Image (cartoon, grey):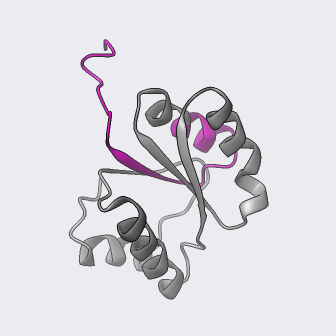
Amino acid sequence: MSAAEFDLKGRTALINGASRVIGEAIARKPADHGDQAILNIRKLDNVKRAFEDIMKTGGMAKALTCHTGESSRINQLFDSIQKQFGMLDIMVTGGGAIVNVSFINAVRRRSLSFF
């Protein structure tokens, strides 16, 4: 796929489980193609290196923390995304992140498409 066919400029992508090898690799793709990558992980220290590497290579990233097993934290995550970015265009559950019922329900309540 050419870069023109994969134009994500101005889009916002949430990547859950973005601190390890698979999640970090997934997070790099949107950032490399011009959109804002939101790296979500339970502990901010765990995502710091991935965030810094993306920023050093010219990508756009924001690191947020949320335990996707806690309903109140999930709602705070989406509220934060809405306040900071207005809209979420892409959501990826990467790496070893487990998507649970609370997370799926929060996505549905926010009228996001879930794949």
Q: Is residue 5 left or right of residue 3?
A: left
Residue 31, compared with residue 36, is above or below; it is above
Residue 73, compared with residue 17, is above or below; it is below
Of residue 106 and residue 64, the one placed in the foreground of this image is: 64
Number of marks in the image?
Answer: 0
* Extent of the magenta region: 1-27
Q: Is residue 7 left or right of residue 23?
A: left
Q: Is residue 57 left or right of residue 106?
A: right
Residue 81, compared with residue 35, is above or below; it is below
- Residue at left offset 31%, top offset 14%: 1
Rendered location of residue 107, percent (x, y): 32, 70
- Residue at left offset 59%, top offset 47%: 95
Rendered location of residue 39, percent (x, y): 56, 52
Q: Is residue 99 left or right of residue 109?
A: right
In the image, residue 5 lies in the stretch drawn in magenta = yes
Of residue 59 and residue 78, the one placed in the foreground of this image is: 59
- Residue at left offset 72%, top offset 66%: 43
Q: Quadrant of residue 24?
A: top right
Residue ranking furthest to the bottom: 72
Of residue 102 and residue 59, the one placed in the foreground of this image is: 59
Rendered location of residue 63, percent (x, y): 60, 56
Residue 111, compared with residue 52, is above or below; it is below
In the image, residue 9 lies in the stretch drawn in magenta = yes
Q: Quadrant of residue 55?
A: top right
